[in-house]
Amino acid sequence: MLEYRYHAPVRSLLLSLTLLLAQSGSLLAQEPSFSVLTQVPGNHLPAAELAAVELPSAPLSAVAIPLAGANSASAAPAAAFVPVIEQPKASTPHRFWDHENRILFAATGALAAADFCTTRANLASGGKELNPLTRVFAGSPPALATNFALETAGVVGISYVFHKTVHHRLERLTSFVDIGGSAAAVGYSLAHR
């Protein structure tokens, strides 16, 4: 086996750099924090105007708000750095059996049926099941049909769990992943007849 002389030193160098950056706070640069920076002289507002300052609502942005009564001649003039954090948009609640989920589950079931048909046809003509989990059921068509029916029911069940735990993106993504896997399996089965 080919050994690399510089493999261990490079790994330790990368680890050292990571620790150095973590210690200096560079890796945490995106974390919202309160910090005090020096103020540009003459850049302070009276208290009345300070209340009228409109803050932007950009996510994780920081806006310098000068302290009231800050004197440009003082030894350490400073402005408080106040992060303005926009709350994440709440996903709109929807019913589980909405239009999009019905379409996704119908596509999941249709592709599972197509996968069953192409797999059964390939097995009947002397082919071999490549999926090790499905290979157990490849001996009989009813067992193979049960496998694909349970796969579809599993996708619906996992999507329901994600829906109830308010993970709506994962709820939809579960169907998309299964549709992609079944479409690839059908395409492979049709290409290797």
Image (spheres, rainbow, N blue to C red):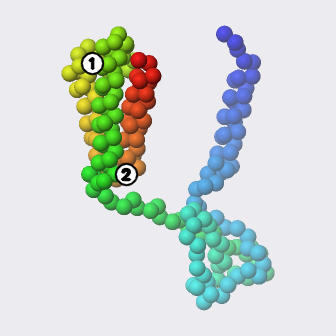
Whichever of labels 1 and 2 marks the residue nearer the N terminus, that label is 1
**Residue that badge 1 annotates:** 137
Q: Amino acid at mark 1?
A: Phe
Q: Residue at x 66, y 67 (%)?
A: 36
**Residue that badge 2 annotates:** 168
Rendering coords of residue 46 (x, y %):
66, 87
Q: Nearer the viewer, residue 157 or 26?
A: 157
Quadrant where the N terminus is found in the figure: top right
Q: How many marks?
A: 2
Rendering coords of residue 101 (x, y %):
32, 49
Residue extending furthest left? 142
Q: Amino acid at mark 2?
A: His
Q: Residues within 10 Å of mark 1 (few under 14, many from 20)?
A: some
Q: Indicate which disc residue 181 carries.
A: none
Residue 120 sits in which quadrant? top left
Q: Nearer the viewer, residue 81 or 23?
A: 81
Residue 143 can be seen in this image: yes
Q: Residue at x 64, y 83 (%)?
A: 68
* SS class, disc 1: helix
Rendering coords of residue 49 (x, y %):
62, 87
Question: In front: mark 1 or mark 2?
Answer: 1
In this view, 42 is above or below 88: below
